[in-house]
Image: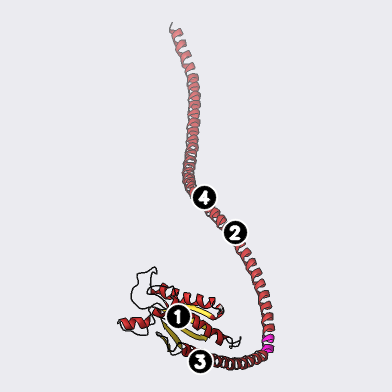
Amino acid sequence: MARRSRRSIRSELNAWPGYVDALSTLLMVIIFVLLVFVLGQAFLSVTLNKRQQALDQLEREVAKLGQMLSLEKSHTTSLQGEVASLHKAHDADVATATSLTAQLNQQTSERDSAQAHATALDDQVAQLRAQLAAISTALEVTENEVHDRDQKISNLGMQLNVALAKKVEQLQQYRSEFFGRLRSVMQDHKGVQIVGDRFVFQSEVLFPVGSAELSPEGAAEIKVLAKTLRQVAAQIPSDVPWILRVDGHADRQPIHTAFPSNWELSSARAITVVKLLIAEGIDPHHLAATGFSDYQPLDHGTSPEALARNRRIEFRLTDR
């Protein structure tokens, strides 16, 4: 028993170093594994740290890129706005250019038209200058003719004046003869007188009051005058322009007859006398009837005698 015990102890003691060796080996393996793990962990930590730094760097770069992208977006938006403004400005410039082009075309057309008009005017000016030159030449030629004509006209005027003076002198002679004969025939007739170069009949001698119809006595007086005038007219040459003027005059008293005023009454009496002279054979080309109403009085008084003097028929032998 004791041997077995000792054998057992001895056996046990002989196995323990093996266990120790095994444990040592295992421990070394574990330590190696731990060392490898620690080294791997350290390497991994370094690697992770580097990666983290790289990630941080990347994040910083991403943030920087984000800022740059934001700036670029803002810049792009600004550029887009500028581009839109430039497009609008371009469109406005295009419209302005189109308008200016149209204006230029219109002005070019107007210029061409003005040039054509100016050319036509130049041609007209040249024609006018040619005409003026021709007229100047003609004027130079006709100045002498005009001078000669003026001289002839002056001479003819002098001759005409002389001829007229002769005619007037002749007419004066016949007037004197006419009035002389009338004076000799009617010198005893009441209401008939000579005033200057006029032979005057008072109206009451020829007409009833307010009437333009000759009384029988008045018609007889006019017939005597017509006979004397026919005798004198037969002696007057045909080229003497004589005329017997019959002037009717009234006073300034208002009338209450068929005539509206003294104008109508004085004119109607003169016309009545002229008609009778024509009926007695006096050429109407040598007669004229005029009415003066009451605006040529012989007497400015208001007495019945003054008014009677102003109511009259005057005969005047004169030239036309």
Q: Dividing the picture into quarters, in which one does residue 153 lie?
A: bottom right
Q: Is residue 319 visible?
A: no
Q: CA distance from mark 2 to mark 3?
A: 93 Å
Mark 2 vs 3, N-terminal side: 2
Secondary structure of residue under mark 1: strand
Q: Nearer the viewer, residue 68 or 42?
A: 68
Q: Position of residue 265 (x, y in %)?
A: 41, 73
Mark 4 vs 2, N-terminal side: 4
> What's the image's color scheme?
secondary structure
Q: Which mark is residue 247?
A: 1
Q: Amino acid at mark 4?
A: Ala
Mark 2 vs 1, N-terminal side: 2
Mark 4 vs 3, N-terminal side: 4
Q: CA distance from mark 4 to mark 1?
A: 104 Å
Extent of the magenta region: 136-142
Q: Nearer the viewer, residue 20 or 188?
A: 188
Q: Nearer the viewer, mark 3 or mark 1?
A: 3
